Image: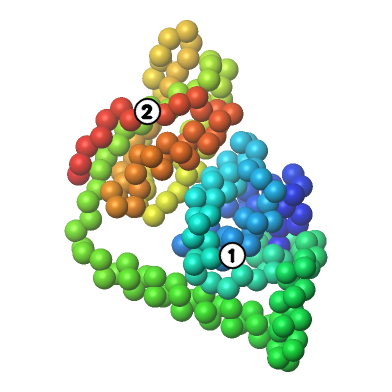
Amino acid sequence: MGFGDLKSPAGLQVLNDYLADRSYIEGYVPSQADVAVFEAVSGPPPADLCHALRWYNHIKSYEKEKASLPGVKKALGKYGPANVEDTTGNGATDSKDDDDIDLFGSDDEEESEEAKRLREERLAQYESKKAKKPALVAKSSILLDVKPWDDETDMAKLEECVRSIQADGLVWGSSKLVPVGYGIKKLQIQCVVEDDKVGTDMLEEQITAFEDYVQSMDVAAFNKI
């Protein structure tokens, strides 16, 4: 189990494939699992690994809050697809943690079960707080104009990168390519957001992070639902 060496192209490819249908490393909210994997990545993944880059930029936005995210951080090899060999080894921090665990006579399996129990308890508390929110949710329909650099930009890949952005309260809708002149077309894409969870600033930050494809993003229309 693991991602392999996350500082290598092969490891980042495994991470990208793993995140193709997931928003987070574990569960449905940011957790210490995301922090552990984020800290093992040396920097932003390349633009063609759009799922990994989307996840990296999203977790980076929690930089000041990462210590308070739910869950218990485990060894890096405890995360990721089961069919990948863990080649990360144990770092100094992991060794220290293991030493502390050995002093109390606990084995890795028992610690793993305890970490899982604590994570599930905190996720349950999080879901309980969400359930207590008022039933009426303010939503908006937003039409975005996403402009490429030139007429050679792969617009299919650009749209794939945009749609790879996932967040609680964000739903992507229809899209089309609109000519802007000189053979260049922009992507016009619709989305529906929950106002208290997703804003245009967040969308612009994450979309323009795909800088190999995206020159700029503008809000073409904004309507309350």
Q: Which mark is residue 218?
A: 2
> Is 35 on the left-hand or right-hand side of 96?
left
The image shows residue 108, relative to residue 167, as above or below, that is below
> Is 199 on the left-hand or right-hand side of 88?
left
Question: Considering only order in the chain, which callout, 2 or 1, is on the residue closer to the N terminus?
Answer: 1
Is the C terminus in the top left, top right, bottom left or bottom right quadrant? top left
Q: In the image, what residue occupies the spot 52% across and 79% down? A: 118
> Is 99 on the left-hand or right-hand side of 181?
right
Type of amino acid under label 2: Asp
Q: In the image, what residue occupies the spot 24% across and 48% down? A: 139
Q: In the image, what residue occupies the spot 49% across and 33% down? A: 208
The image shows residue 188, relative to residue 202, as above or below, that is above
Residue 173 seen in this snapshot: no
Type of amino acid under label 1: Ala
Q: In the image, what residue occupies the spot 58% across and 52% down? A: 19
Give the residue at mark 1.
Answer: 33
Is the N terminus in the top left, top right, bottom left or bottom right quadrant? bottom right
